[in-house]
Image (tube, helix red, strand yellow):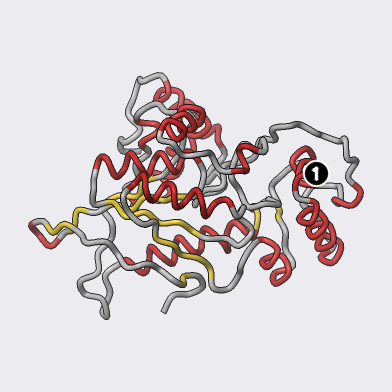
Amino acid sequence: MLQSSIISVSPHLPQIHVGGGAFVSQLAWFSCGITSAVACKLAIESNPNTEIYYIEIKSAHPDNERFIKDCEKWYGQKINRIKSFKYSDQFDVIRKTRFINGPSGARCTKELKKNVRFDFENSLKPNLFNVDGSEFTHQIHGFEYKISEITRAIDYLMDFPYTNAKFPLIEKKLTKPNCAKMLIDAGISLPVMYILGYSNNNCIGCVKGGKGYWNKIRVDFPEVFWEMATLERIIGHSCINGCFLDELDPLDGFTPKPVLPSCSVVCEDIMPPQINLSKAKKVFYGQMSLNVSY
């Protein structure tokens, strides 16, 4: 029995059987972000026997449904969906756990994404009651081609070697603007959150956002702003260190394009970025391959 997370998983697509009892199949993670969307397309092109999975969260923008359908047409296949059965969104996590964020990160990231992914991975492993079960040969992630993302990829490979992760955007030196152009060229409109000026298609009301981000949410999604502001007072803690949202100066930290961590299935850095910075720079400048032993 799964510990905490998964409900409503679409049936697996047919897998290609090869000698030795293995299956040649890879899993690509889709997040409704433009980089993950292109990474999934590249994964399918490199291996048609790719299955795509998306972790649903209630607080995503409604336009994501349109984007998913457009991408499904582009891919020529359905995007499978999984989600937490304990929590619907970040507000639900905060209400039930009475925790927003802290030095160890945001609780909602752990509950809504990481635990869902871990439980799903566990469900794929062979066990006494699923003797024919098998893991995917690779997992595909949409980390883009820039030094900070290459560092995250190196950290990920070290922390989760069992996933045999691949990063097609890094391999092909594709940045987020490159991915945006590829989607537009394919006739797919970017998700509304990007059009509104957000740099990522995160949950609306991301607890990792700073003052500028929350002031933009105040303008674009006032009901979300005040729901979080009210919840902060109930819990007694704030999203922004040292400032409750209902005390936030509307002009403080304002920027039309706030920068947030890209919220995929691995939302936060696993290790301090500087640890593998030298390796990331070598990968960025083509002096070494990302997929080497560490």
Rendered view: 230 above or below 201: below
Q: Residue at x 29, y 64 (%)?
A: 12
| Residue 91: quarter of image | bottom right
Which residue sits at x=23%, y=47%?
Answer: 48
Q: Report the residue marked by disc 1.
A: 219
249 sits to left or right of 88: right
Position of the N terminus, as image quadrant, is bottom left
In the image, farthest residue toward the front: 187
Which of these two is toward me, 250 or 280? 250
Q: Residue 283 at what x, y percent from top left? A: 39, 26
Residue depicted at x 85% and y 47%: 242
Q: Please give left or right for residue 267 compared with residue 197 in the image.
A: left
Q: Residue at x 42, y 28 (%)?
A: 174
Badge 1 element: helix
Picture coordinates of residue 166 (x, y %)? 34, 42
Q: Quadrant of residue 47?
A: top left
Q: Is residue 145 visible?
A: no
Nearer to me, 220 or 160: 220
The reply to whether residue 27 is visible in this rendering is: yes
Q: Measured along the vertical axis of the image, is residue 41 above or below residue 245? A: above
Looking at the image, residue 68 sits to the left or right of residue 58; the answer is: left
* Residue 92 position within the rendered picture, expressed as x and y whole percent measured from the top left: 68, 68
Q: Position of residue 198 (x, y in %)?
A: 65, 38
| Residue type for callout 1 | Val
Task: Give the farthest residue toward the left.
Answer: 19
Above or below residue 59? Residue 263 is above
